[in-house]
Image: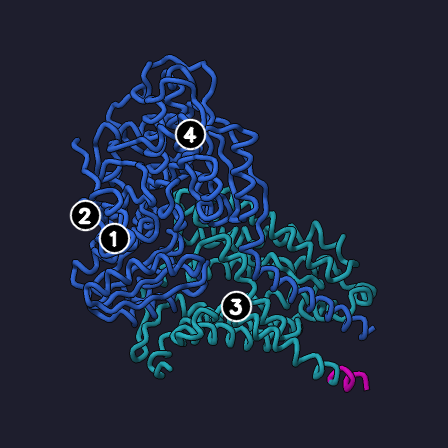
Chain colours: A cyan, B blue
Amino acid sequence: MPSWSDFEPFIVSGLALGGVYALSGVGLVVLYRATGVLYLAFGAVGAMGALTAWSLGQAGAPGWLTWLVCIAVAAAITLAYGVLFGPALAKRDPLVKAVATIGLTLILYGLMDLLWTTSGGEARSLTLPSDNGGFSVGQIQVNWTQVIALGAGVVLTVGTGLFLRFTKLGTAMRAMANDREITATLGVPVRRVEAAAWLGCGVLAGIAGLLLADLVALDATTLTFLVISSLAAVLIARLRSITITFVAAIVIGLLHDLLTPITSLTNYRDMTPFVLAAAALLVMPRSQVMAQSREEA
Amino acid sequence: MKANILSARRTIVVAAAIAIAAAGCSSSSSSSSSSSSSSSTSSTPASTSTASTSAVSTTQCGTKPGVAATGTPIALGAIATNQPGTSFTDIPNMANAYFACVNANGGINGHPIKLYIATEQTNPAQIAADAKQLVQTDKVVGIIGNTSIIECSVDSSYWQKLGYYIIDSGIAPECYSTPNSAAINMGPRYSSDGAVQYALAQHASKIVFDQSNVPGTGYIAAGPAALAKAGNVPIVQLTENVPISDADSVAIKEVDDAGPNGAVILNFTPPEALVILQAAQKLGLEDHVKLWGCSTPCNTDFLAQSLGAKWNNKLFVNAELTPPDVTNTTTMNLYKAILKQYGSAVSGGIGSFSQFGFAEAEIAVHALETITGAYTVASVNAAFKGVTNFNTGMTCQLWTYGSYPLHIPNNEDYTVTPDNGKMVTAQGCTLISSIDPQIAQYRSAAGTAALAPTS
């Protein structure tokens, strides 16, 4: 068993990854609560944004512009999907809505493979200026991108919580989560509220794509399927609580990286989100039913 | 109403769980069908090629400059992996470019070469079907340019049964350990040997050898393990699930295990190696070990450009073929000229993959030109097998097929290092050590180490 000092460096990398998983998870929860759609294309649109940003960078565009384009591309694709397909799918079963986003994922994935082929051994990277600076905590080197990743997770979780609670738009989103029809009857412009949710989710997908392209890899496959870790956090939160989503995402990122120095477990660390999500699914239904009963009583 | 909402939520939670499981299996679920393409005669310049060719005419590739071959085509076949994240199609595509050049300049005694390229997605049933299609439907008389993760393992016995002698770029163990396959490259094991050998020569006190967690890692790891053991240097063997989603952790572990006088040797595809090396750089770890090494896939300018100057003389990459950027021979210039004129389908441009394809096509054309009668399976494969001491201009050694139980005809390599965005030679031709028992067995069978080119 490794000593505590062996684990220390992995705390920082785990927290940074957990932070990005958290902001992704928050985006997924907010969109689900507003529209009933579990957006499985979250990773793919982020990847699309990041690869577009890389191409712009290669063409000589300044860094700040490429970052904005990354976010804009992810937001535009997500908003366009929501506006075009959202109304048609609004009354369909949640399973149909989720599967439809897998369709978008596959289209984007194929497009990325076509536009940014890996034939010939191309290796791409998207680095942020924050990689070049940082500080040390004891023996641990921390760079600013890691700090930004964790900070973005915290800020967006808190900010989204406040937004949902204290703004008119947030209140409308919460109302729609309970009942879309009644909310519409009360005069809430549901299409506009849904569009805002899609746009917000797309922006978060772009930010996550940018950070993950730097922290993990600029690769369509990797970025597309990194949504799994966020999805596990969302599942643990039962698609409801952004606070639980945040905590679960941090735990997933942290636990995943802390398993690295343990030789017997290191090759199984990628199972972390699956194991935690499965455990949550097994344990939580009973307590949720009890809570539901109490609510109804 | 609340019950309905709860029900809907439960449904979506179950759906999401299924989606997670499906995504977890995604890397092995590809099943698209194979495709064949006829030889291209496109003269569109390859947009990805930026080679400066020193006034070499592509008409040198054929025996009758400017005279297009119009005879009965000689059908050859190739199978290449082509799936998201892993594509080796540049190799047969470059061979096809070479053949297009030959066809435009006389062909083989007036016969054009037609290369059928089948692609596969690491599906054994599909790969076996590809081989049968090439033989039974396309009627190919020879196989050249195969580059696949598992094709050698799947089809080796089939080729032996039919009497085909394959000229390929090897990955799986059977590409090197069977009588019917001879590769232009060393493959992951011997290339990793070369990288470890270089680190040991630099007096690294410990070796950390890290590679993808895929089938065949034990076979690859055996070579570096033997070299380290012979040098009395401890070796730590690691494997990583790919795609790597936590490069920071991987880099930290490698550096911790190697120590300040140790070496970290990577055997990954360029994108995976890049994320590890960049993670090390971001964490300031590149100077925390004596040196970093890498097997051949890292030998790309893409990687050198992405890494930047911090890795100059810090990363040392095994190179199985002659470095193209700093070589100005007639053959190298012909390769660049053909790539430019005929290589529109070669997406990676100048690099190891297109060099593999060029050299394999050279060998095939050389063999076909020795045939005086009909181009049949028997005559073509006898010609392939009979290639002896052929100078491809791309390797340290002359290339020989021969009647051996195993084939490692390329067992002498270069070492290159990044130099401000380019890969430059750090060490010239060096024989891979016979301490690797497979190399020793080949040299025993082939008589001795193969000769070096005379020009």
Q: Secondary structure at mark 4?
A: helix
Name which residue type carries label 2: Thr
Name which residue type carries label 3: Tyr
Give the residue at mark 4.
B96
Give the residue at mark 1.
B194
Q: Nearer the viewer, mark 3 or mark 1?
A: 1
Of the numbered discs in the image, which one, if any, rests on residue A21? 3
Whichever of callouts 2 and 4 sits on the residue coming sooner in the sequence is: 4
Work out whether disc 3 and disc 1 sit on a shared chain. no
Query: Chain ID for label 2?
Result: B
Q: Is residue B47 rendered to the left or right of residue B447?
A: right
Foreground: B303 or B1?
B303
Q: Secondary structure at mark 2?
A: strand
Foreground: B383 or B321?
B383
Among the 4 quarters of the image, the one containing residue A295: bottom right
* Magenta span of residues: A291-297
Give the residue at mark 2.
B430
> Is residue A295 a member of the stretch shown in magenta?
yes
